[in-house]
Image: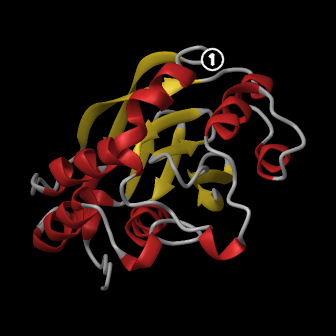
Amino acid sequence: MPLGFDSASHGTIAFGFFNIQSDMLLLEHYFFFATEFCKYISNIAEISEQGALRTFWSVYHIDDSRDIGDLIGAIHGIHYTGFIGELYRRFPFPERPENFKQNPESFKNQSIVKAIIEKYARHMEIPFVVGEGGQDVLIGKCRFSRNSFQELVRYVWRGGYPRWKDGVRPDYALTMKRKTEQSRNPLFKGLVLGG
């Protein structure tokens, strides 16, 4: 489930997984796969520059909230609208609460998820900018302090809410952990992901 995270630009914003059979993440109106997020983070972790850094992330963007859909309605099986509604028709919420765990193999469903989101979203490049000394980060239009950005990384590492199924993390998350632990980039200073 997406959770609220503090941003320096927009107050509390939504970020996270939103269907346990998809590794797609949402950041407000931006959508991208966790495989890509972890790859971007791993690549940035390999850069040890102290100065500002600018790169671009490839994302999907849905302008209209109605095209995003009603997550709570879809979870409860009563309101299937927009992208999220169509995704939940394909991958419904589990009937048993104990089965509500993020599937570490959900990346295998990316082709299905892409086919659905492309009906609602446009593909675009957004800036990812690390401020001087790694003090802050801009993702598209959303600015985060280093601490808040690190919370996004921790969320993905944990498998969001409700966590990874059986505590098993996918390889892309393990690679991200290894790269950030070895990083000399100030953006990752103080980041501890744990076991």
Q: Residue furthest right?
A: 78
Q: Is residue 64 above or below residue 157?
A: above
Q: Residue at x 54, y 33 (%)?
A: 30
Q: How is the image coloured?
A: secondary structure
In percent of the image, x 49 and y 54: which residue is there? Answer: 144
For the point 49% across and 25% down, which residue is it? 60
Q: Is residue 75 above or below residue 116?
A: below
Residue located beneath label 1 in the image: 120
Residue 135 percent coordinates (x, y)? 36, 60
Determine if residue 130 is in view: no
- Which amino acid, mark 1? Tyr
Viewer-side residue, 155 vs 88: 88
For the C terminus, the image quarter is bottom left
Q: Residues within 10 Å of mark 1 (few under 14, many from 20)?
A: some
Left or right of residue 43, residue 17 in this image? right
| Quarter of the figure with the N terminus | bottom right
- Which of the two residues, 24 or 58, is positioned nearer the viewer here? 24
Q: Residue furthest front?
A: 95
| Above or below, comparing residue 8 to residue 154 in the picture | above
Q: Is residue 155 left or right of residue 125?
A: right
Circle 1: element type = loop
Tell me, yes or no, if residue 45 can be seen here. Answer: yes
Q: Pick the residue in front: 83 or 128.
A: 83
Q: Position of residue 84 (x, y in %)?
A: 68, 35
Residue 153 position, x and y percent, is 39, 63
**Count of picture labels:** 1
Residue 37 relative to residue 112: left or right: left
Residue drawn at x 44%, y 48% as measured from the top left: 23
Where residue 18 appears, as percent x and y from the top left, is 61, 50
Position above or below: 82 against 136: above
**Quadrant in which residue 183 is drawn:** bottom left
